[in-house]
Amino acid sequence: MKTIKTDVLIIGGGLTGLTLAYYLKKANITFKILEANNIVGGRIKTQYNTNQAPIELGATWLINQQVNALALLKELNITIFQQHYGNTAIYHPNQDQAAQLVQLPPNNAASYRVANGTYSIIKALEQKLDTNTIACNQIVQSIKLLPNGLEAKTNDTTYHCKHIVSTLPPLLFSKNITIKPALPIAIQDLLKNTHTWMHNSIRIGFTYKAPFWKAERTSGTIYSSVSIIQEFYDHSNTDKNLHALSGFINPSFSKHTKEERKILALKQLQSYYGDQALDFESYEECDWSNQKHTTIESDSFLMPQANNGHPLFKDTYLDNKLFIAGAETSTVFPGKMEGAITSSQFVFNQLKAIYK
Ligand SMILES: Cc1cc2nc3c(=O)[nH]c(=O)nc-3n(C[C@H](O)[C@H](O)[C@H](O)COP(=O)(O)OP(=O)(O)OC[C@H]3O[C@@H](n4cnc5c(N)ncnc54)[C@H](O)[C@@H]3O)c2cc1C
């Protein structure tokens, strides 16, 4: 097993980890990011197919109040564009009623998507970092307090460092990483009782040659309590020349196969739009409930956003050498991209004061 030394070890190469790394690099503080997957991004996942609209399978929308995220995007020269909802939606309340076209209330709070896909944020951050500061396929298994720092072990490497920042969803951190000496009971309890945003959601999307849902007397916005699709939106690209429909399906269809989900979703779309819905280019999906580096079963039912932004996440542990960051730890927009960025800024300010 090889040993590598660094000052700050960041566990997790999602938005929190990469944003923190970007700030640390600008402040000349030495760090390494360890990422369990073979690519960085975490819950930001965009499927790119040549000459088709990029399909978001993870984080998608931003609003004006998410000021830290919007400021970071501006700094990275990433543009956003308004989500198209239209004036109407297809509303399918139950089996006994036919789907109906309803008027949407005026939309005073615009939501935005990232031009060329949310993953462009990840790509832009990655490009700002030196390639040797990111190690993929590194699953951190343990953290140990040493007399002169911390040690973290992965499948094949031991890391020695001064500080560790976990950016894992708290529940995953508590279940998958052994910590010696054990953390205080209060934070152990908190970690295992913190809900992970979107941990059981299933995102799907179909790309199409033409946006037939933009025709009169129909809509690309769907709200349904029937069959598989629950919430669907127009997902055309920023130039409006590549088209798609995408959204969330009922999480209970996790037990079905990908092919079964595709067929059920197509059948539902066919019932709203006719046979043109069957003429898709590609089908993409991500079932987050089986993404093992995001989701793990909790011991008890956790209400959405349970314990998100709890004050104990602001404390430091293991002789003030361990920081617990990540979207769910933020008091603002916890679980969201804004939460991830705000949490990285909070930890960065503490590290900056230490390393000044
Ligand atoms: C379907 C879906 C839709 C969403 N929609 C929106 C939206 O519209 N707007 C919005 O603002 N937010 C949205 N979000 C939330 C947004 O994606 C998250 O807030 C953000 O990406 C979290 O970033 P993070 O870095 O804190 O955590 P993560 O992205 O979870 O990153 C943690 C990283 O740690 C890695 N890791 C795990 N275990 C280990 C280990 N043992 N060792 C090393 N690395 C490890 C993981 O692989 C991962 O890369 C959505 C999320 C999902 C899943």
Image (tube, helix red, strand yellow):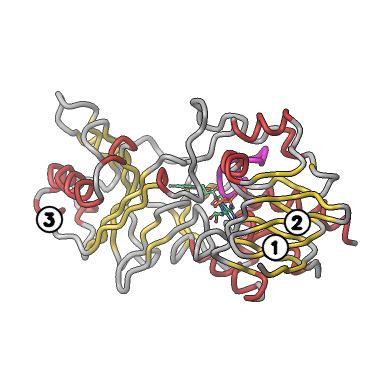
Camera-side mark, 3 or 1 = 1
Q: Which badge, 3 or 1, comes first in the chain's sequence?
A: 1
Disc 2 residue type (three-letter): Glu
Q: Please tell me which residue lies in front, 42 or 207.
A: 42
Question: Badge 3 is on which residue?
Answer: 276
Q: Which badge, 1 or 2, comes first in the chain's sequence?
A: 2
Say if the magenta span includes residue 348: no
The answer to whether residue 217 shows anywhere in this view is no
Question: Badge 1 is on which residue?
Answer: 158
Disc 1 residue type (three-letter): Thr
- Residue 268 x/y as whole percent: 17, 42
Q: Which residue shows up at 30% across the image and 44% down it?
A: 221
**Does the residue at mark 1 contact the one at mark 2 (Cβ under 8 Å)?**
yes
- Residue 300 x/y as whole percent: 51, 25
62 to the left or right of 93: right
Q: Which mark is residue 184?
A: none
- Sort mark 2 into few (<14), some (14-19) or many (20+) by Cα contacts within 10 Å: many
Q: Which residue shows up at 51% across the image and 33% down it?
A: 298
Q: CA distance from mark 2 to mark 3?
A: 57 Å
Q: Which residues are magenta?
A: 327-339
182 to the left or right of 229: right
Q: Which residue shows up at 61% across the image and 64% down it?
A: 156
Q: Quadrant of residue 211?
A: bottom left
- Residue 184 x/y as whole percent: 76, 32
Q: Which residue shows up at 49% across the image and 41% down it?
A: 296
Q: Quadrant of the C terminus?
A: bottom right
Q: Quadrant of the N terminus?
A: bottom right
Question: Badge 2 is on which residue?
Answer: 151
Mark 1 element type: strand
**Does the residue at mark 3 contact the one at mark 1 (Cβ under 8 Å)?**
no
The answer to whether residue 93 shows anywhere in this view is yes
